[in-house]
Amino acid sequence: MSDYSSIINHPHHQSKTRPHMSMTARAAQFSPFAALTGYGEAVEETGRLTDEKIILDEDSIEELNRKLNMISQGKSDVAITHFLPDALKMGGSYIISSGSVKKIDAVENKVIMEDGTVIPIEDIFDISFLEQ
């Protein structure tokens, strides 16, 4: 082992051809960097929870059909709880869309709201009528 006694008192070398680096520039050399670009987002996406779509029984389907009939006969201010599939992975979430129903498209099996929201009938979980 050497105790560096032969060089400890020598002056620090300064380049004659290059300017002295500032403390800020020197510190930037050692700052952290994102070696795995996108890794944090991928971990966050994997950890994001989704729900499975609930399959309705016959009684619930019958009740929804009754409510859809009431809507088609003029009762149009509703809150519809429906399944929204996730765009990135299996599952999705249940959301509530409220407002007036513009029309029920029996050919496409969709409920179209006044605000332009389109809800597939097979994704509807519940319908509540709002007070007018």
Image (tube, rainbow, N blue to C red):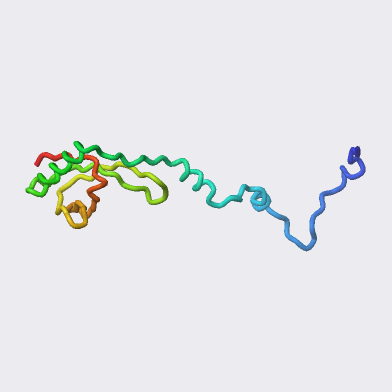
For this view, does 125 lie left or right of residue 37?
left
Please provide percent x and percent y for residue 65.
Answer: 15, 44
Q: What is the residue that sits farthest to the left in this orientation?
A: 73
- The answer to whether 22 is drawn above or below residue 92 in the figure is below
Which quarter shows the C terminus?
A: top left
- Residue 84: % across, % down: 31, 47
At a point 51% along the width and 44% down the height, the residue shown is: 43
Q: Is residue 103 left or right of residue 1?
A: left
Task: Count how many numbered circles sit on residues in the image.
Answer: 0
Residue 13 image offset from top left, x and y in percent: 82, 53
| Residue positioned most to the bottom | 17
Farthest front residue in view: 58
Q: Residue at 37% across / 44% down in the picture?
A: 91
| Between 19 and 59, the one nearer to me in the picture | 59
- Percent x, y of residue 114: 17, 53
Q: Residue at x 91, y 37 (%)?
A: 1
- For the residue pair 101 and 108, the one nearer the viewer reads as 108
Residue 58 appears left or right of 46 = left
Decide if residue 12 is on the left or right side of residue 53.
right
